[in-house]
Amino acid sequence: MFNTPRRKAALYMSLGALFLSIVPVFVKLIPPESGIPTTQKLFMRGAVATLALAVVLLMRGISFKPGNPILLGARSLLGIAGMLAYFLAVEGMHLAEAVTINKLSPFFVLILSWLFLDEKLKKNQILAIILGFAGVIVILRPTSIPLTLPASLAVISALFAGSAYTTLRALRKTDRPLLVVFWFSSAVTVFFLPSVILRGIMPDLKSLVFLFCIGISGTAGQLFMTKAYRCAPGGEVAIYGYLSVVFSMLWQILLFDSMPVAAVFIGAGLILLGGWINYRNNGD
């Protein structure tokens, strides 16, 4: 059933979307009164992944030496910037809004893959990009509400995430998915360690469980997403990442007892339509 690169990419990206949609859920489940800073959540996201992946790499006898350290470093820095902006956006917005706006990242992948990787950008893909950005404008409702800092961070997170994902296409020839995620997770851990030492809070048992769940679900999602981008061009893989929009709406309704406003449904619809057009444009 999943015997072609494109079908494997579809499966991997769908699973990645599921696991990655769970990450912001646990971010929001940690109550603000706990005092746990965003940097500590990001540290746990990286630390859990680093430890788990180190064990896997050792068990499989895979060398820790990166094939393209410069590109891996760029991927890590872009990913850290995107993740920090995303976590801050999730903490300050409704879950469905933050996740949906973050789904601009595949459209940035299209643009950046065209600019830097010589992947062709077709007319229908341009239409898809326009629909995607139009969807975000509808969600933000700039004529009726002010553009808030969390909303701006959500857009910024999509730009950095799209940039980071684009590097995965270039890394596919030099580094295995496990190695890519390991070094990215290690970079996240090291980057936020000083903040945890200086400002970290000892969490209660409930918050500690949520922190570990951020790391576990993020690791699984990152691995599946990395494998997906290695199996097919960025434009073909993007459509399946939009499933996280659907998942986030379900989580917001089921777990936070909050129905997204009509603008979110309309904007999400435009983004999903753009993704579908892009997917159909690539053919079977």
Image (cartoon, rainbow, N blue to C red):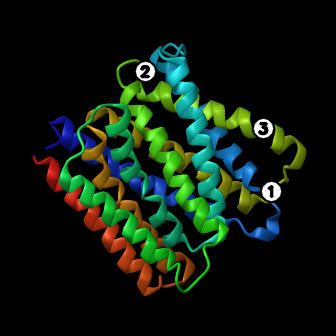
Give the secondary structure at mark 3.
helix
Residue 175: numbered disc: 2
Give the residue at mark 3. Answer: 193
Residue at coordinates 50% horizontally, 71% vertically from top-left?
Answer: 97
- Marked residue nearer the N-terminal end (3 or 1): 3
Q: Amino acid at mark 1?
A: Pro
Give the residue at mark 1. Answer: 203
- Visible residue check, residue 144: yes
Inter-mark Cα distance, 3 to 1: 16 Å
Mark 3 vs 2: CB contact within 8 A = no
Give the secondary structure at mark 1.
loop
- Visible residue check, residue 58: no
Q: Amino acid at mark 2?
A: Asp
The local crowd at label 3, few if under 14, some if 14 to 19, many if 20 or more residues have their Cα within 10 Å, is: many
Residue 264, picture quadrant: bottom left
- Marked residue nearer the N-terminal end (1 or 2): 2
The local crowd at label 1, few if under 14, some if 14 to 19, many if 20 or more residues have their Cα within 10 Å, is: some
Give the secondary structure at mark 2.
loop
Q: Amino acid at mark 3?
A: Leu
Q: Is residue 267 left or right of residue 187?
A: left
Which quadrant holds the N terminus? Answer: top left
Residue 24, picture quadrant: bottom right
